[in-house]
Amino acid sequence: LSPGSDSLEAEFFPLGNLPDVPFSSHRKIIKDGIKKEKK
């Protein structure tokens, strides 16, 4: 396996400055992860 060219666009974002996430399922995963981290 090798990374595709789109992997060059991968970035990390601070939790307070996340970009818009177009998929509701992904927004829920992020929201649940943040909630769990705060416990």
Image (tube, grey):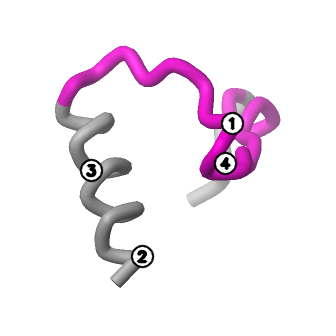
How far across and down, in percent of the image, does residue 21 sit? 43, 23
Direction from residue 1 to residue 38 in the image, left or right: left
Picture quadrant where residue 25 is located: top left
Q: Give the CA separation, mark 3 to mark 4.
A: 24 Å
Spatial CA distance of label 1 from label 3 is 16 Å
Q: Is the residue under label 3 in contact with that under label 1 (CB below 8 Å)?
A: no
Residue that carries the numbered disc 2 in the rendered image: 38
Question: What's drawn in magenta, residue-wise?
Answer: 6-24
Mark 1 — residue?
A: 17
Tag 2: amino acid? Lys
Q: Secondary structure at mark 2?
A: loop
Q: Nearer the viewer, mark 1 or mark 4?
A: 1
Q: In which quadrant of the rendered image does the N terminus lie?
A: bottom right
Mark nearer the viewer, 3 or 4? 3
- Taking the spot 31% from the left edge, 35% from the top edge, the residue there is 27
Q: SS of the residue at dot 3?
A: helix
Tell how many labels: 4
**SS at badge 1:** helix
Give residue 35's mark.
none
User: Is residue 25 toward the left or the right of residue 15 in the image?
Assistant: left
Which of marks 4 and 2 precedes in the sequence?
4
Q: Earlier in the sequence, mark 1 or mark 3?
A: 1
Disc 1 crowd rating (10 Å Cα; few below 14, some 14-19, many 20+) is few
Comparing 11 with 37, the one in front is: 37
Q: Residue furthest right?
A: 8
Kind of residue at disc 3:
Ile
Q: Quadrant of the C terminus?
A: bottom left
- What residue does disc 3 label? 29
Whichever of labels 3 and 4 marks the residue nearer the N terminus, that label is 4
Circle 4 is placed at which residue position?
3
Q: Is residue 28 left or right of residue 15?
A: left
The answer for how far apart the CA atoms under marks 2 and 1 are is 17 Å
